[in-house]
Image: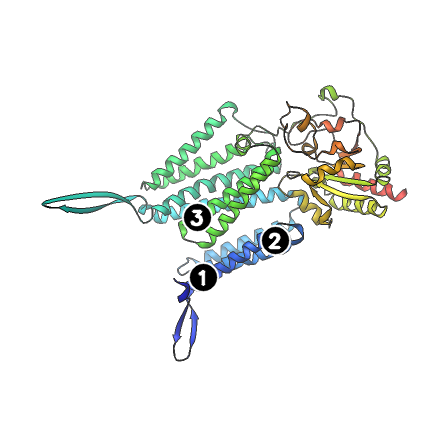
Amino acid sequence: MSALHLFHTHAAAGGTFFLRTEDAIYVLYIIAFALMIQGLRGLAGPKTAVRGNRIAAVGMGFAVVATLLTPGLGNWGLIVLGIGLGTAIGIPAARNVKMTAMPQMVALFNGVGGGAVALISWVEFRGRGSTYGTHAVESTIKVGAFTFHHAAPVAGPATYVAIFSVVAAIIGSVSFWGSNIAFGKLQEIIAGRPISLGRAQQFVNLLLLAAAVAAGVALIDGVHSELLFIGMLVAAAVLGNFVVLPIGGADMPVVIALLNAFTGVSAACTGMALNNPALIVFGMLVGASGTILTNLMAEAMNRSIPAIVAGGFGGGGAVAGAEGAGEHAGTVRSTSAADAAIQLAYASRVVIVPGYGMAVAQAQHAVRELAGELEKRGVEVNYAIHPVAGRMPGHMNVLLAEADVPYDQLKEMDEANPEFQRTDVSLVIGANDVTNPAAKNTPSSPIYGMPILEVSDSHSIIVIKRSMNPGFAGIENELYYDPKTSMLFGDAKSAVSDIVAELGDL
């Protein structure tokens, strides 16, 4: 439908115009696209993130209304039931989730999207699968007294639907099951360490991928077998499990971004199969942004995406005290809240380095209170944020924004690192692997080459940590054995609150 015919004359004499249903649907989709893109722009910074999220939600509302206006949509009773169930589950889950559990929720919701795509593809196959494949078109050519007959195979009208449906089903199934494993690891239902089949892991993964692709090719070629389609989904499901299980906790932020990109691409493919502009545009936005984010996260860890997918990093083992610390054994210095308060109170410049320890203790408000007390004494306070601190991209930014930490005090790694040399005290709260000097000093370390926050350049360092157990990477942190480092053992929220109380007594 041309834009020039968007409006139709209903009564020429009266000059009355009306909008056709089909045209109205596309107008609503265009409004939805514009709002969604504007919403994504707002997510670029904490100051505009809430507004951007609301704008994107309104855009999604327009898209839903446009979809519901589609003629011959289907069983309205089931649609209303689905919307009701989704609302009843989604709103309480989103409102009640703790900030520490936000990575798990992101992984779970992302998986639900991939699962929905796989189910839609299955339904599409059941409804139109018999038209997949090719058919022969005969042509006759006369040359003088000779007549030539030729039968050429031509793709059927629904072949492109078959291709996109199959691709969406495979990627959606991988995303759903992979996201479930990521959720299990983050929720500690499944061990965070790599779980693999050893040397056979990659061979098994390739075999599963080949099986899924072979089944998909057969379906596209015209084999109408629902059992084959289910087999393809199962192969992709097992592949999704086997891809994420060998990946350790240290790589989880990258995995979440990668699975998010998978879900977006699968949704876009479904949109192509269903001729739904909203799914195409929204899917590509999610797929593109997820891909960019995955690449940024991988670069922040000095790891390639294939190496992350291959797994085997992030053992998450435990070390009791300094036992097993090798040459560093016995060199850890502990401190008290009173001594830490004195160090911080008489500093000119303090940098707070948050990590998952702050998140799990819900210590962000106590940290904000500590910063406020120090600022009253004329101490300059900033926060150094590593791109993969926590368990999902932007985890620390979200937590600190919740505690009303001014955005201009949040310094990204490239901005923060040059400032550590003039920092009097760096207060590290649970940030383990992202502050480990082994990434620079120990070539044999599995994190060697990974960009880190160069906290060791500070004049003195205070580390708040429950114990000497390692982080997601499963290796000891050399920073803890630095003569400039003092360890304050305990729950992050309690330890920070104790320091604030001691500051009040000075």
Q: Position of residue 101 (x, y in %)?
A: 64, 43
Dot 2, crowdedness within 10 Å: few (<14), some or many (≥20)? many
Q: Which mark is residue 25?
A: 1
The residue type indicated by label 2 comes to Gly
The residue type indicated by label 3 comes to Thr
Relative side of 314 to 160, left or right: right
Could you tell me which secondary element the residue under label 1 belongs to?
A: helix
Spatial CA distance of label 3 from label 2 is: 27 Å
Q: Which mark is residue 42?
A: 2
Label 3 belongs to which residue? 270
Q: Residue at x 29, y 44 (%)?
A: 134
The disc, 1 or 3, on the residue closer to the chain's N-terminal end is: 1
Relative side of 230 to 397, left or right: left
Q: Is residue 255 above or below residue 70?
A: above
Spatial CA distance of label 1 from label 2 is: 26 Å
The disc, 3 or 2, on the residue closer to the chain's N-terminal end is: 2
Choose top left, top right, bottom left or bottom right for residue 491: top right
Spatial CA distance of label 1 from label 3 is: 18 Å
Q: Which mark is residue 250?
A: none
Q: Position of residue 259 (x, y in %)?
A: 53, 40
Could you tell me which secondary element the residue under label 2 belongs to?
A: helix
Q: Position of residue 38 (x, y in %)?
A: 57, 55
Viewer-proximal residue, 75 or 287?
A: 287
The residue type indicated by label 1 comes to Ile
Could you tell me which secondary element the residue under label 3 belongs to?
A: helix
Q: Is label 3 or label 2 in front?
A: 2
Q: Position of residue 73 (x, y in %)?
A: 42, 58
